[in-house]
Amino acid sequence: MKLRYIYMTAIAGLSLSLASCEDFLEKETDNRIELVNSKQIVQLLTTGYFTGNYGPICETSSDNVMDNNSPHVDALGDGKKTVYYNLTSYNRMYDELFAFEPVRSSTSTDSPSAVWEGCYNAIATANHALEAIDKLRNEGKVDAALNGAEGEALLIRAYNHFLLVNIFSQAYRNPTLSKNDIGIPYVTKPETEVLVHYDRGNVADVYAKIREDLEKGLKLVTDDIYADGQARKFHFNEKAAHAFAARFYLYIREYDNVIKHANIVLGETEESALACLPDWEPFAKCTTGSDFANAWLNPESPNNLLLVSTYSTAWRGMASSVRYACNGDIAKATLYSFSPTCSLAPAPWLSNSGLFINGKQDWGLLSGKGVEMFEYTDKVAGIGYPHIVRREFTSAETLLCRAEAKILKKNPDFEGAVADLRAYDKNHQILPTPGVEKYFNRDGELSSELIKTYYTKEKNPLVVLDYNTSLMDPEFVISEEAKPYFDCMMDFRRIETIGDGTRFFDVKRLGLEYSHIIGKSATVETLTWNDPRRAIEIPQEVQAAGVESSYAKVPAATAPAASKVSKSEVKSN
């Protein structure tokens, strides 16, 4: 077996001339804390959440971003093709990601390195907690808090592996086909050695292990171990756990399970779901970026199920870069699109979240939900840590998971899906922005008839897309009858998650083919449904330590070359 090296713990002051590596590792360091009760384990799990913001690398790799240096028609322009030849990117990493190339230039914040390390550090915390829990259980020191902590630790381990496999591997297809796709190392034990043997395994096996941890964690997780309701939102609480379950089962297409777990979060009716969605009234009083961020991230909101604080400079990258952006046809399909019931997209991201314009209008739309929060370690020196808090699970996204499940299950429930989509649509019309109401309810409430009339290729070619689900798995078929409902759901889902990075997961699991047009020369890079580059390459330093490339099991004829490009003339974007 090859040598696998997942992460390292820096050991300061080690002198190999005084002791061997083995001797050193057998001794406890002076600052090591022995976990002797459930309270300490619960406190440890506060540090068990990933710190690397995967949004930037996934968003840049998706179909939500274009290159403003390429020929394009501005989303709000006069319809004439415009090219800005010399716009800059925040750093070279974004150039590499947009070209679907391995990232070789950055190990800093928001890079694949930061995401890989952040997830595996969180997994390491969960594994240390689980080891301590086993020890206490063997000693007969079991209480409700210990069981709850075990549930949270299992969910942390499951979710971080879920992120890793969806970023650095191919999308799940089915239990058989996914055995042919390289996975990610599934780590279940704390590190006790500097060098450890690991195998990336395959995607099917990774999903099976995620399922095992998830289902065990769901039985144990409890809100009772966190008395503070706001603090609870920064941990896998009960609703966040079931929202994760709904998303997981959606990806493996067990639709009845999606509905079961989404119902625990949302209730079973349109009215109960609507009550779980955002209250937009607080946004009316916002004036600054911090105001909008606090409104988006309010832990008291029933919409926010799990909040995760990351070290991230993504806001700076968007605020200073003008090259890669949501513009052109992408903006027309999302930020500036219509919907069946209104003449403006039901998108508070656009109309109600505080837009910060940088440079030309065709580039800089920044949502308040991604505003940076700076933690000062020395205010006088002006130094500290930049944070972006992610809304990792929300009621709104869970509602759209349930709608998709109702549309695609063996015996479709189209009217049930319409009820979910109608709740989402209604919520996005309750906006305090003055004058915005004139855009809504032009044709009444959302209905099957409106959906089938509105979502056609002829009427909305930018929204009605072709998904290659049956190529991903012959049994993954979206019927002609289901397609309009599915297009409506995906339209809402793309708007709901824009900027978060999860659109990349969606285009992968649905086999959507899309292209990035690069620079003045209009070089076209297209990701077909089975392109190996749909898996982001693992960090180069991890490969150097012996971990297999994401393309290790791809046939040589289809493996991406380091500088692979294909050129094509394009008329517009």
Image (spheres, rainbow, N blue to C red):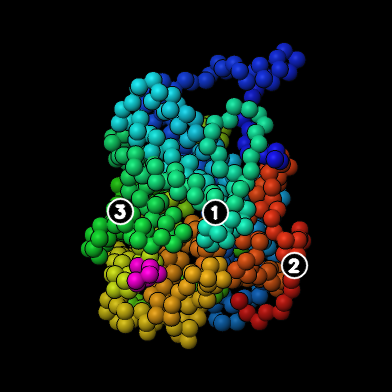
In the image, 209: left or right of 408?
right
What's the residue type where badge 2 is placed? Val
Position above or below: 360 against 165:
below
Tell me the tag on residue 339: none
Q: Which quarter of the figure has residue 18?
A: top right
Provide residue 419's location: percent of width, then percent of height.
28, 70
**Which residue in the structure is indicated by mark 1?**
204
* Residue 254 within the segment the image draws in magenta: no
SS category of the residue bearing label 1: helix
Instruction: Write the start and end of the magenta stretch as one range.
Output: 406-412
Instruction: Looking at this view, name the residue that lies furthest to the bottom.
Output: 458
Q: Earlier in the sequence, mark 2 or mark 1?
A: 1
Q: Against 401, is 76 above or below?
A: below
Residue 557 vertical placement versus 195 (above, below)? below
Residue underneath mark 3: 265
For this rendering, which residue is in front, 438 or 346? 346
The numbered dot on residue 565 is: 2
Dot 2 or dot 3, earlier in sequence: 3
Can residue 157 be seen here? The reply is: yes
